[in-house]
Image (cartoon, coloured by chain):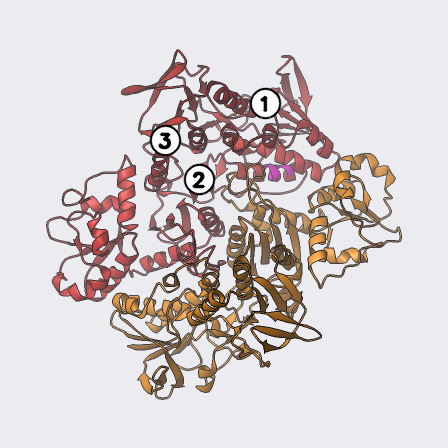
Chain colours: A orange, B red
Amino acid sequence: MKVVIVGGVAGGASAAARIRRLDEHAQIIMIERSGYVSYANCGLPYYVGGVIKEQEELTLQTPESFWDRFRIDVRVRREVTAINPAEKTVTVRALDSGKSYMETYDKLLLAPGAKPTVPALSGVSSERVFTLRTVEDTLRIRRFVEDQKPKTAVLAGGGFIGLEMAENLAEMGVSVTIVQRPKQLLAPLDADMASFVHAEMRRHGVALRLGETVAGFRQDGDSVLTLLEGSEPLHSDMVLLAIGVTPDTHLAKEAGLKLGIRGSIAVNERMETSVPDIYAVGDAVEVTHFVTGQKALISLAGPANKQGRIAADNICGGNSHFHGSQGSSVLKLFSLTAASTGINEKTAQAAEIAYDKVVLFPASHAAYYPGARSMAMKVLYEKESLRLLGAQIVGGDGVDKRIDVLATAIRAGMTALELTEMDLAYAPPYSSAKDPVNMAGFMIEDLESEKVRQFHWNEVEDLPCDGSATLLDVRTAWEYQRGHLDGFRNIPLDDLREHLDELDRGKPVYVNCQTGLRSYLACRLLTQYGFTCAHLSGGYSFYRVVTKEQQTARSAYPCGMEKL
Amino acid sequence: MKVVIVGGVAGGASAAARIRRLDEHAQIIMIERSGYVSYANCGLPYYVGGVIKEQEELTLQTPESFWDRFRIDVRVRREVTAINPAEKTVTVRALDSGKSYMETYDKLLLAPGAKPTVPALSGVSSERVFTLRTVEDTLRIRRFVEDQKPKTAVLAGGGFIGLEMAENLAEMGVSVTIVQRPKQLLAPLDADMASFVHAEMRRHGVALRLGETVAGFRQDGDSVLTLLEGSEPLHSDMVLLAIGVTPDTHLAKEAGLKLGIRGSIAVNERMETSVPDIYAVGDAVEVTHFVTGQKALISLAGPANKQGRIAADNICGGNSHFHGSQGSSVLKLFSLTAASTGINEKTAQAAEIAYDKVVLFPASHAAYYPGARSMAMKVLYEKESLRLLGAQIVGGDGVDKRIDVLATAIRAGMTALELTEMDLAYAPPYSSAKDPVNMAGFMIEDLESEKVRQFHWNEVEDLPCDGSATLLDVRTAWEYQRGHLDGFRNIPLDDLREHLDELDRGKPVYVNCQTGLRSYLACRLLTQYGFTCAHLSGGYSFYRVVTKEQQTARSAYPCGMEKL
């Protein structure tokens, strides 16, 4: 068997090694356009920032090491320019010589990845406008940074790579501005959860220009002008374009392979394309979203690697299946970790899934043990079935743990109520006896058994201010004085029982506290004294961060202005 | 409704607060023998060691705060001395006055916990022999440590509390010796995995006297002698007894409640005892082990808190169920984290479950990102069903994450093969594109599809040395020279294909490498050239640590002595 693999990173390299493990006698040729294979794709921003110091660390495998260990014939700086399925051949061009030749295959695996989206704007080819995909791109940016010592940078795009680059450049002392057309960074998060990311970026001096659209670039002496629609242009010493990626599928298209959404390659669960003996994996293929069941593009290394292994099994006569991706992701941003799994509210709404949610601020570990830090956690579940749909967490230590626990629960098809029973490992340095994941379950249980009702930060401005409802803040007097929602009366939770007679049982009560715990207790209490009560999900602190950091947030306060 | 709760920590305190949330009008009396309620049980060793600095941090809730917030009538330094189920009363003795009184109840919740096992040995009541259960015990030990400045301590017992105390005392400069009758520390781990714990303790100067039995204690001036069976006594300035805990159930016994194993209280899934209107939770009750289905005692804060909540639901007319405990636990030991969930090999063998296992040493996160550290991971699964049974992990960062992911997978009833598909969040600072949990799944998949066979460290000495088998070490020459198993011939993996003709296809091949990855690759290769091959699970490094640190390990090497 002769296998030709197009693309030598993540999915392609995984598949090559697995094919060899399964078939010692196969001829395996891996063709890679860049000069490097199996490189640390996700580490590239950290090499620019000097966190990863040696170039060798990015490229632990070489064509030579692939040959020595796996007898894989790696051909770098070769580009497959055409596929001829009828003949079972590919046309390969050697980039250095420019010469082309034919290569036959019995099985062909396409792992071309995705390329940075480069919009058709004036000036994008300026030498100070960079994109980041390959090791070569990385070396170019690092060299530029070392030689030119840029003081300012504009990053167009607020996704994973954009934000990682922003952090790395900022840590080097570069003054960074992120321009992003959507009014939030990090699309996998909902806008409210992204507010914590905005705050962290600003706290580290990164300027955010959200809701702004880049109209083009212009070289201006030693700097570059980023032209914005309807705003003054931005001057900077360099620009990084990281507005997204596009499946690199012109080959597949030209060969007549069936395409999926947004120009991706359509594959089945065996990673087979529409053409016999041609497989495809990684960022170039369309996947089934594990939660929605809809087709999706999910450009992440984890699924790519798993798909490579599955394609290899099937190429070697096995029968392995990829059951979809749920988009679990995590990102380090200065001292913050932002992570998500499954779907967010935007996706749930688009997929017309009836959902509900809880927002909480649990501590990373026992509060009495040094170093505990609270995290913001949002968990989504389907209203009818109580099936878990997704989670978003932003915080410090332990964020990645809880997102992986929730990712596993989603994968297992658990309901939200099952979170209450999860038997997780506890010791004070690691968690609390009731882990944040358990807490989310408890909250959902109380919501679903109608022990409590909640309202959300974006519903605050719609609260009645005409005296037809009681607006109650149950924090301490000290907390209340430091800032509260206008129109909200302060009765600290511990004093509430003594003041019940002052409240009108005929009026609904809307309660807030700092994070939503005490307001929940207040509602339990009030409900049992005959009041109708709802509490503010996530509390005043969530409301404050979201309305301050989120440019999309409506900023009106109920009943006038917020008291600071 | 009048509810009396016996015991004011974990399960009792959780239940009290939940009952109030569910029933604002219930009368709730919580009776606690010690002077403190809802204290940070699991934080006590860290207060002794000064990691937790303020006593107030241990006791965030007080009787007053319970009253203010929850109208729970907390009575500390009161002991329930009898239960009269026929009359629905309890007898309460005020410890300070010595006076007794009766208290009626509609519902009674027993949350008495477990007490440190104190063997009937001479000298156990010496003032320098301590146990650790309550805040009072903690204050006593801390005062002793501050006043007497002990230079040496003997810890009898190598469980959670013993090890946490050992760490805290050692960090204060006390020279610590742990005496433990079993030949390993930390029973939730198998002996081989406990070897890493032994190594860490020794590396930090803690002396281990494993397989030794304490025969008694004798005060000797300002020090105390720990008498050992068959060994010289140990001199030290203090002794801590932490040989285990015993359910504190004399009350339940005398009241005629049905008992479970080892004197525990028998309860059903609703946390009801055999007597109507009496519930029990926490360390005092018998639980169903989630994995084996057998009755078990599991003294952990997580299950206790969850049981308290469930009992409260049922006391208030609900219908909540506790579906068993899987014993997930984690422990910090100097720079090491040791964690486990489900069952270990000892338990699987005792329960006569046919299981298999994989051992691996994955990196905590992408090796090219700074700070990555490998962890030792063992995953057990049932042979026939492939159901996950348990996991043990010892290492640094990310151990607690992987144990919680595996705990969740076990809870969800996942098979080991489903680990291959788990969609976990990846970025270089947090994981690898193939997470350690995925890797365990891949290894089990290869094992179960018979792509590879393995042998284990304790089978090494049984390998044939008479030339009837080929013993092969596929590490580099440099690694081989630094230490290898005698009788094993070195052919580095990358050279293996060139040396196949030197190997006899008629003989089985046993291969080892450093951690088990290259030996797996070698076996895949050899198998396809017609050899019968098995590789050493966990590799030479696992074998070395286990045989060095584990006093139970047989120390014979195959074919003579190990070459160092």
* Disc with the residue nearer the chain's start (1 vs 3): 1
Q: Of helix, strand and loop, which one carries label 1? A: loop
Q: Amino acid at mark 2?
A: Gln
Q: Label 2: which residue?
A: B294
Determine if marks 3 and 2 fall on one subunit.
Answer: yes
Q: Chain of mark 2?
A: B
Query: In front: mark 1 or mark 2?
Result: 1
Name which residue lies at 45% across and 24% down: B117
Q: Label 3: which residue?
A: B206
Q: Amino acid at mark 1?
A: Ser
Q: Amino acid at mark 3?
A: Val
Query: In front: mark 1 or mark 3?
Result: 3
Q: CA distance from mark 1 to mark 2?
A: 33 Å
Q: Which residues are magenta?
A: B308-312
Name which residue lies at 51% across and 44% down: A423
- Neighbour tally class for label 3: few under 14, some 14-19, many 20 plus, Cα within 10 Å: many
Q: Of helix, strand and loop, which one carries label 3? A: loop
User: Which of the 4 quarters of the picture holds residue A143?
Assistant: bottom left
Q: Chain of mark 1?
A: B
Task: For the N terminus of chain B, give its image quadrant.
Answer: top right
Contact, CB < 8 Å: mark 3 with mark 2?
no
Where residue B447 sits in the image (x, y, percent)?
A: 32, 57
Q: Is residue B250 visible?
A: no
Query: Which one is nearer the viewer's eye here, A349 or A139?
Result: A139
Where residue A254 sits in the image (x, y, percent)?
A: 46, 86
- Neighbour tally class for label 1: few under 14, some 14-19, many 20 plus, Cα within 10 Å: some
Q: Label 1: which residue?
A: B34
B474 above or below A304?
above
